[in-house]
Amino acid sequence: MADKRWKIHKFGGSSLADAACFRRVAGLLLDYDDTRLGVVVSAMGGMTDALIDLAILAEQDDDKFNAALNAIGDRYTETARELLSGEQLVEVLDAWSRDAADVVDVLKAIALVKSAPQRSRDVVAGYGEIWSARLLAAFLQREAPQRGGTWVDARNVITVRDTELGPTVLWEESAAKMGNVVPADFRGIAVITGFIAADEAGLQTTLGRNGSDYSAAIFAALSKASELTIWTDVDGVMSADPNRVPEAQVIDQLTYNEAMELAYFGAKVIHPQTLGPAVENGIPVTIRNSYKPRHPGSRIESRAAPTDNIKGITAIGGMALVNLEGSGMIGVPGTADRLFAALRKAGVSVTLISQASSEHSICIAVPEPVAERACKVVSEAFADELDNGQIQRVDTTEAQSIVAVVGDGMAGSPGIAARFLGTLGRAGINIRAIAQGSSERNISVVVDSAEATRALRAAHSGFYLSAKTVSIGLIGTGTVGSALLRQIEKQIGKLAQNFNLDLRVRAIARSQKMLLGDRRIEISGWEDEFVAAAVDTDLEVFVDHLDPDHLPHAVIIDCTASDHIASKYEDWLSRGVHIITPNKKAFSNSYDDYRALQKAADTGSSHYFYETTVGAALPVITTLCDLVHTGDEIRSIRGIFSGTLAYLFNVYDGSTPFSEIVRVAKESGYTEPDPRDDLSGMDVARKLTILARELGQAVEIGDFPVQNLVPEALRECSLEEFLERLPDYDDTMDTVYREAAAQNRQLRYVAMLDAAGNASVGLEAVDQSHSFCNINLTDNIVQFESERYSANPLVIQGPGAGPEVTAGGVFSDLLRLANYLSTGEGYV
C-alpha cells in the first residue's frame, strides 16, 4: 500500500542542467508510487549566476544585459522545445516571456540609479527556480497527466523575517499558507520552487546560497513528510573531499549532529542550515546521486549504527589566526568578553577558538579577508594594555586551514585525539592551534594551508578510512633494485587487502634516465614503460614529483652504492622525505656527516632505515637496537660481515692456491667485479663503523686497524694485472693458513668492537669449535656479548649477501616504516 505521507525530493542545478537531466529527474520521480511527492527544484545549472550577472551589468549601466538575457532565453527555449510541444510549449514560453519583461523592467531601474539593492538582486535571481519548476511540472504532466502538472510558487508559502542569523522562517504563517496553497487532499507530484520566499510585507526575498536545500527542509517540515531526499551529483556525504582525498568513501549513515559538523567544516553536499527543520521534526534526510539512482547514498537521522571511529574528515581553507597574548591576561575576568565584543562590533565571525589553560593567550580563527580588520579592532580594544605592556602582542598568521575529524563515536573513546595528532606529526605537519568541544564530536586543528591536503590524506588513512599511502621512489635498478620491485609486485595486493597499505611506486631512476608516474608506475611493466617514457635524470625533479603536497608520506629507496646519491640524504631528510637504503656510504662517512643526517631527520620529522647496510636481511641493527633500548649493556660485537670473504676462507683449505679460489669466486659472481673491493676489508670496516655508531661511539674509518688482503704492489694496478700477478703471493697466504691449521684453527676474516671503542678488522685464526667455523659458504655471522648474554653470546647467522636477500631486507624496512607511519610504533 502506498504511503500517504508526503515525501519531499530536492534536485539541484547540476541535476537540471539540460533536457536530458529533466528527463532523468522525471523518470526518477515517476518510478515512485507514493501518493504525494513534493519536488523542490533549483535553477538550471549556472542559471542563478547568469541572472546575478544581469544585475551587475545593469548596475554598471551596460546595456549588454539585454543580450545576456536573450542568451538565457535561448538556452531555456532550446531545453523546453526538447521536452514539450504544442499548447504546453506555447504556455511555458509565453510565461517565460512575461517574466523576462518583468526582469527587464527591474534591470532598467537598476541601470537608472546605477545601484542594485539586495531586494532587486533577489527578484532577478529568483526567476531561475520559477522557470525550472514550471518546465518540470509541464513535462511531468505530459508524461503522467494523472500525477503531474502542479507547481507551487514558494513565495506564496514561505514567509521569513530577516535577522542577524539570516532569514528566519515564520512557521505559523507559513503553515497556514501551505494549507491554503496545497489542498489537504492533494494527490500527485507538486513541483516547488526552491531558494525564493516572501518577507512579512509579501515582498520577494531569497533564502541565500544553498537556499533550495533549505527550502526542501522547510517544505518537509510544513508537510510533516516522512523523509527528505536531496538529489545531487555525488553519491552521498563523503568521508573527505574526493578532489583532495581520492580514496574518500561514501558514509552510509550519519547522525544529524555528525552531518552538521561535517557541513559546517566544509563538506559541500549539505548546508548546516538545511538540517535544522529536519532535526526539529525528526525527518530522515538522504543524500543521493541523480546520475546513479541505484546507489543508496547517505542517510542522516537522529541515530546511526554505533562506531568507535570517526565518520569523516573535512577542512576549511582561506582562514587566518589572530593571536592575543600577554601576561596581563592571566586571572583577569572579562578578557574574552572584551575580545569577542570588539569582534562582534566589527562584524567579524569567529570560526574557532583556542585558549591556553594558563590564560596567557587566546587564539581565534577568522576568514582571511577579515583578518586585518579583526587584528585592528582587537588592537584598539586592548590599546591601553598594549601600551603598558600587559598585552605583549596582537598578531595575525594568514594562509591557514582548519582540519577537523568528526564522529559521534569519538565521545568517550580514549586515544582518538592522540591518533589524530600523532598521524599529523608523523606526516611532518605542524599544528598551530587545537580545539575540541565537550561533546567530543569534533577535534579541529589549524595548519598551514599548503599542508591542508597532506593533513587530510594523512588523517583519512590514519583512521583507516582509506589505505595508508606511501609514495615510493626507487634509485638504482640493478640486481637489488630489480629484485625489490619484483617482491613488491608480488605482495602489493595482499598488503592492500590485509593491511590497508597502498605502496605506490611513483618514480624509478637510474644514473642517466628516470621514469615518473602520475599516480603510480605499474610495476609489472615498468621496464617497457621505462624504455618508452623515461626522461633525463634530475634528482630535484625526482624528489619534487615524489613528495607532492597531497601525499602525506614519501620515501626514497636508494639501491646504489653511490657517494653522490648518499650526499643527498641530508637535504631529502630535512624536507620530510624518508630514506631506506643498503648503501653504507652515508652512515659510515665522517662522523660529522652522520650527525648531520640525524639532525636533518629531526628537522624534517623524517626517518631513515638501513638494516641492510650490515648483514643484508639479517636483523643485526634491529637486534642491537633492541638490546640497547631495553637496557642491556653491550660488551663486545664480533662477526664475519662479508659473504665474499666468508666464502673464500670456507673454501680455502691449502690444497688449492688462494689466487685460484679468488679467480673462481669472481667468475661465479661471489665477489665484486673487482675482487680487491672485497679483499681490501673496507666494506667490513664500514659495517663495523655503522654498528659502533649505533652504540653511540664517535668512530671514524681510520681510527682502527683494517687488514688489507690485497698485496700492496697490486693495489693500484689494473684488474687484469692484479689477477695475473696474484699467484705470486700465494705462498704468503699458504704460510698463514698452515700456521693456523697446526693449532687446529681456521682462518676467518673477523671484525671486532668492544664497549671501550677498541675495534679491528682482519684475519684471525679461530678454533675449529667456534661458531665462526660452522657456517655455510657465504654466511654472515654476528656475535653479541652483553650483560645478559655473557656466558652464552647471542648469535645471528645466515646469508649476508645476494640480491633477493638484500631486497627482502629493504622490503622489510619499507614495511617497518609503513607500520610506524600508521601506528607510531617501532624503533626509527
Image: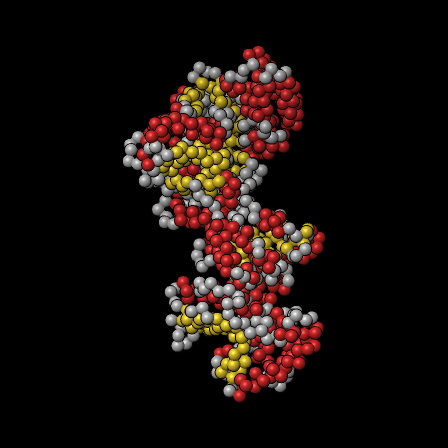
Find residue 349 and report its image quarter: top left
Pick the residue in front: 772 or 453: 772
Q: Position of residue 800 (x, y in %)?
A: 55, 70
Q: How many marks?
A: 0
Find residue 494 and report its image quarter: bottom right
Which residue is most to the front? 713
Q: Is residue 169 visible?
A: no
Question: Residue at 39% of width from left, 31% of height from top?
Answer: 280
Q: Say whether residue 286 is left or right of residue 359.
A: right
> What colour scheme was applied to this rendering of the protein?
secondary structure
Q: Say whether residue 650 is left or right of residue 443.
A: right
Pick the residue in front: 366 or 26: 366
Q: Position of residue 690 (x, y in %)?
A: 50, 64
Question: Residue at 67% of width from left, 74% of height from top?
Answer: 722
Q: Say whether residue 608 is left or right of residue 416.
A: right
Q: Is residue 59 visible?
A: yes
Q: Compared to 280, does 548 lie above or below?
A: below
Q: Position of residue 390 (x, y in %)?
A: 33, 33
Q: Position of residue 814 (x, y in %)?
A: 53, 58
Question: Residue at 52% of width from left, 52% of height from top?
Answer: 573
Q: Compared to 299, does 150 lie above or below?
A: above
Question: Residue at 49% of width from left, 83% of height from top?
Answer: 767
Pick the residue in front: 324 or 806: 324
